[in-house]
Amino acid sequence: MHDKDIDESISIAPSLDLSIAREQEENRPLVSKRVLFLSVQVIFNAIIIGFIAKALVALISLITNLSFYGKFSLEESSPAHNQLGWLVILIPVIGGLVVGIMARIGSSAIRGHGIPEAMEQVLTNKSRIKPIITLLKPLSAAISIGTGGPFGAEGPIISTGGAFGSLAGQIMHISPNERKIMLTAGATAGMAAIFGTPVAAVLLAIELLLFEFSPRSIIPVALGCATGAAMHYALFSDAPVFSMPDIPPAGTDAMICYVVMGAVIGVIAAFVTKSIYFIEDLFEKLPIHWMWWPPIGSLAVGITGYFAPYTMGVGYSNISQLLSGSVSIQLILGLCFLKFISWSISLGSGTSGGTLAPLLTIGGATGLGLGVIVTSLFPQINISLPTCALIGMAAMFAGSARALLTSIVFAFETTLQPHGLLPLLGACTASYFVSFFMMKSSIMTEKINRRGVPTPDAYEPDILRELNVEEVMDKNVPAVRVNENIKDVLEASEGKIQNGYGAIILDKEDKIRGAINLKDLYQGLLKGSTAISELKYDEVFVFPNSTLLAAIILMEERKLDLLPVVSRQHKEKVLGVITKNLILSTYRRRREDSDEHQQEISIKRSGYKFLARTKRLREEQSKRLFRGTK
């Protein structure tokens, strides 16, 4: 809630005379100095996270060169061209063993995708992440990916950026909500630093991490993402991450085909998501400590990599090849099935790595494969194979992660293909729609949902913030005099006590002195007090245009069951009373009204009225004609 909502609702008198009441109204702007303070901090954090992203990519290259080629070099390389023969099976196993030991000794939080862990800390731990994660997560991910793990660097850097933002937020003197903004800004700055996609990173924050949309959160996050993207341009390249040939505009037939492809990929996305957690369940049943699971899962990476070396490592080059639209059927099938097998088993074992790059690879190969099938069977449909790969990778991400807008904008920002926007919108929406009905959770939320942590799935307006006290208050004011006897008040409670809640206290001149709960009257009587003036009561009230949210917070802070509503111009004049029951019943009624199915216009009833009106007009016309003949 905004400070303005609270401050405009509370007025506390320092003495018994409300004529000298001090009204705390500061009318603070929606974007306050705190937002400026956070913005400066997240920009500074994003610069550091950009260097961390560069260091992570360099470390992955170093470990890859050492593991598969035996040379000390930071030059970017892929395990696909190694000459190790069957020894290649052992490299991922060694990497998985090291990651398992690091998780056992250091922190088990380094295991997993990266984004779900950040979501869990936002929802359950006031956005507090252990500082050691800032070091261990990128290191473990570099070892896992550098030894052939089929993961992307984006998940670890998102987790690392979030951990760094959380660490800075724990050092600073800020609120948990501001720390959430710091964590989110750090995580999404990491994504922007890897891919150079600032807008997609902001949308990722909204759809998966922030669970809100407000200026106080969007401004710092957007600045952090912009800074992260600037670091990408400065440290990596200003060219699109995934280069592809220019794609043509989609015709009507092609557009329909793309949407159908998106729906098919939505089914596959649901299958992929369920497979990941099915494999996790299988590992949970193993009679050994989870420290040994990563090397066991990495065995699948090594075996798959022996037959298809291109499935190992980050594989961003594979995505670029798919987007070209001219790859062999063998590569398409390998990236569809073998990449999925090695990635799902390895990720299900609990090793450290990201999900985005594998989803893009599998989705791009699936989309391209579907495009090849359609082109072979229906050559008259003029579809573009690069477009099929593009919508495939985005639709897979949209269906698996339930991040619709993020997937569309991400695909556009990484390829800069404006003619792809319409096919992306149709295909990603279809995939999102299908997967929504096929699975309850996404690949990002299933893990934490299993731990009993509910995740928001919708962004709805706050009903209590939308309604004013004036719309709900009861104008029948239960009032007692400050000098009245407590016993007399309780015995003659009719009209004095509001439905068992309490009463408003007035002085001899009918000026408001405060409010008191019914239970406080009984407790005062038991303690031997006789007059109401001997009791402790709060001199507090709200105004007619105060929000219900401000009123309920004030009630909770002062432990009151009701509040007087006074005129803003004449604070001694009581207009009504607001109770917790009125607020809760109004909230329930508004929720029911918004979900109730209603037919505002009845075609059947309107048809009957039209026929009756027509019949009446005909009768009147007949009467006029009859009179005219006479």
Image (cartoon, rainbow, N blue to C red):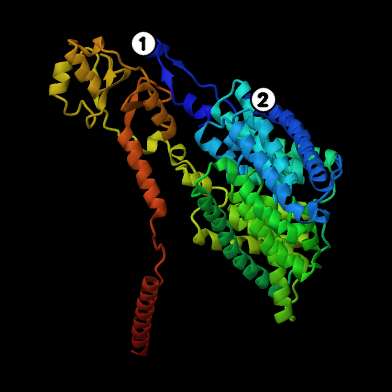
Q: Secondary structure at mark 2?
A: helix
Mark 2 is on which residue type? Phe
Judge left or right: residue 553 versus residue 580. Answer: right
Residue picked out by circle 1: 17
Judge left or right: residue 590 versus residue 164. Answer: left
Query: Which quadrant of the view contains residue 275?
Result: bottom right
Judge left or right: residue 420 versus residue 578. Answer: right
Residue picked out by circle 2: 37
The residue drawn where x is 43% and y is 25% is 568
Q: Residues within 10 Å of mark 1 (few under 14, many from 20)?
A: few
Mark 1 is on which residue type? Asp
Q: Residues within 10 Å of mark 2 (few under 14, many from 20)?
A: few
Query: Which quadrant of the view contains residue 172?
Result: top right
Q: Residue furthest bottom?
A: 629
Image position of 269 with respect to 6: above or below? below
Q: Picture coordinates of residue 580 (x, y %)?
A: 33, 33
Picture mark count: 2
Whether residue 597 can be seen here: yes
Q: Nearer the viewer, mark 2 or mark 1?
A: 2
